[in-house]
Amino acid sequence: MAYIYRFAILLVLLSATVGFSSAALAEQKSPVTLKGNITLNLIWYGKFTPIQRSIIVDFLRSVNSVTAVKSPSVASWWKTTEKYKTGASTIVVGKQLLLENYPIGKSLKSPYLRALSNKLNGDGARSITVVLTAKDVAVEGFCMNRCGTHGAKSRSVNGGAYVWVGNSETFCPGYCAWPFHQPIYGPQSPPLVAPNGDVGVDGMIINLATLLVNTVTNPSQEVVSACTGVFGSGAYPGYAGRVLVDKSSGASYNALGLAGRKYLLPAMWDPQMSKCKTLV
């Protein structure tokens, strides 16, 4: 069964936090851990603009970029994964499939996600297929207890893994795209300006980053989910922490990527320092 990327609503309410897009409680079943050179394939389900696709692809290509990028960078954020037992992982963007005509509708059940991931085969155990659903696609459990999922593509250990992330712009930006939108729960602090000018897609980056890290490290620890709602130093419930701000646009970010991109990435649990590690 897939890992279900969940928001702990009860915990949120008890601690007066907001519905952080990186909060998760994982089901510990059939863990799939990848390491080494990993091919990442993308399935775009529904309509995404070319700009939206480029924001996400540029992020993925920034993860292991050898091109010099000023600090703090996406690549330096990813290097923390090397501290885990699985060691270093290199992500390479592979095939892409556009399904803009909604071949199985706009309301998807959970089993459909794994089925969609199998539309792109190949690369075996060292592959991740990412299914990205557009803002007008409803997915079972989406916005109610999860913003994404990760798990095994099949029962075979050689089948690789899949990740699903939905665009929450239409359905629940305050739930799956915080801190770029007013939160559903907790302190109503002003939202941050999305670094790429797209609340839904910038929220997807946070969730995708979380799920990729949890997939390539030990899934039983959900290493980014342990740092729910932390994006910069001094973070506390309802406050993302001290992050960088673009002087011209007012956008908030904490990582630089290829093509001049800026991203806001979640803190990651550092097993050597035993604390949530932030870039800024």
Image (spheres, grey):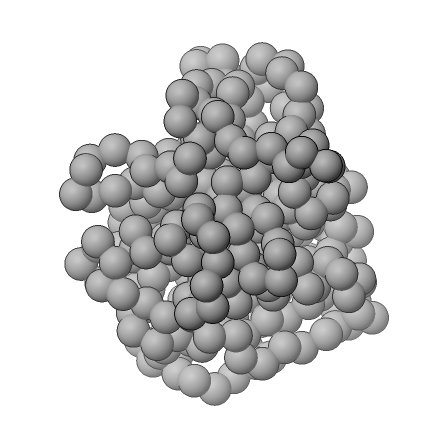
Task: Return the residue found at the far right.
Answer: 101
Q: Name the residue at 30% across, 51% down.
A: 80
Please give left or right for residue 223 compared with residue 6 in the image. Answer: left
Comparing 226 with 247, the one in front is 247
Residue 34 lies, in percent from the top left, at 32, 68
Please identify the quadrant where the N terminus is shown.
bottom left
Q: Nearer the viewer, residue 164 or 103?
A: 164
**As displayed, is residue 258 above or below residue 195?**
below
Q: Above or below — where is 196 with respect to 180?
A: below
Q: Quadrant of residue 190?
A: top right
Quarter of the rendering occupied by the C terminus:
top left
- In this view of the protein, can residue 98 be seen by the observer? yes
Q: Residue at x 35, y 42 (%)?
A: 268
Q: Is residue 49 left or right of residue 80?
A: right
Q: Residue at x 43, y 23 (%)?
A: 235
Q: Who is closer to the viewer here, 143 or 280?
A: 280
Quarter holding residue 212? bottom left
Q: Is 92 drawn above or below residue 208 in the view shown?
A: below
> Height in image: 31 above or below 226?
below
Please indicate whether residue 198 sits to the left or right of residue 81 in the image.
right
> What residue is drawn where x is 63% and y is 70%?
43
Total numbered badges shown on the rendered structure: 0
* Residue 149 left/right relative to 35: right
Residue 92: x %, y % from top left: 46, 75
Residue 172 can be seen in this image: no
Residue 96 is situated, as x and y percent measured from the top left of the image, at 63, 77
| Residue 120 place in picture, x, y as percent | 57, 81
